[in-house]
Image (tube, rainbow, N blue to C red):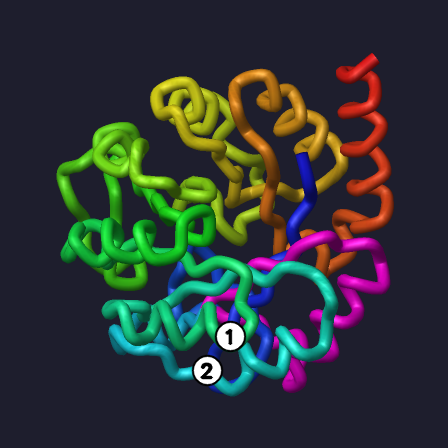
Amino acid sequence: MIVIPAIDLKDGRCVRLKQGRMSEETVYSTKPEEIALKWFEKGAERLHVVDLDGAIRKTPVHREVVRRIVKAVPIPVEAGGGIRNIDTVRSYLDSGVHAVILGTAAFRDPDLLYQSCKEYPGRIILGLDANEGKIAVEGWTHATELTPIELGKRFANDGLEAIIYTDIQKDGMGTGPNIEATRMLAKGVDVPVIASGGIADVEDVKKVLTLSEDGVIGMITGRALYEGGLDLQEAIRIAKEKMQQKGA
């Protein structure tokens, strides 16, 4: 179980949104690669990078920024947002990105996910973003009738590295993660799950850690780190201690 800092990109800057609303942004830095280095120096073992503009425009906007982040840190970087074709998948992975995140593409173009997993087994992540229990796509602007478990099961045997589950209503709100929905997904699909959305403090970290037995392998947190509600070093320490206790 690892704690993964989020770096969301909008207009070349590192920002956080509330419930994915582009109009409700808080800017934290104009140099995202410096933020990446900061989190690495505080012990991060992995970074989660999302091209918010790319998600809306349906094509990556911040490729160069992502490349700078990859060059700035010697840890795995997962990246998503606007990836809609195999050439973009190849471009990201060949440039040093550890794994790409496919969300809307998995819903709109399942063959892209199949092909990506075949060419890059273990380096494709399925992003499942849900609002009131139903999948939302296109930068969370379009609702579907599918549940996370239904969509997750479609690709469970295709060689995914993991599934990232985000509860949109929790994202950026600091109200705590949706523990039960995350547990249900982890139990419902035979793919490791990474929890995202709503983690505000150490107590939330501890709650997510209880899901390790259900197949949750990590948690993504953003606003809490940037605004001081959660200390990354403390969160990592608690997670490691919990896993050591589990191992003992």
Q: Indicate the quadrant containing the C terminus: top left, top right, bottom left or bottom right.
A: top right
Query: Does 245 sit above or below residue 43?
Result: above
The one nearer the camera, 144 or 153, is: 153
Q: Quadrant of residue 240?
A: top right
User: Is mark 1 in CB contact (under 8 Å) with mark 2?
Assistant: yes
Q: Which residues are magenta?
A: 25-50
Labels in figure, total: 2
Report the amino acid beneath label 1: Leu
Give the numbered dot on residue 101: none
Query: Does 213 sit above or below residue 12?
Result: above
Q: Is residue 112 magenta?
A: no
In the image, taking residue 110 as reference, residue 218 lies left or right, namely: right
Give the numbered dot on residue 9: 1
Report the amino acid beneath label 2: His
The one nearer the camera, 156 or 206, is: 156
Q: Residues within 10 Å of mark 1 (few under 14, many from 20)?
A: many
In the image, taking residue 136 as reference, residue 235 lies left or right, namely: right
Task: Find the residue positioned furthest to the front.
Answer: 119
In the image, taking residue 25 as reference, residue 52 lies left or right, namely: left
Query: Does 218 sit above or below residue 184?
Result: below
Q: Is residue 39 magenta?
A: yes
In the image, taking residue 148 as reference, residue 27 lies left or right, namely: right
Task: Find the residue positioned furthest to the top.
Answer: 248
Q: Residue at x 71, y 27 (%)?
A: 206
Q: Residue at x 21, y 35 (%)?
A: 154
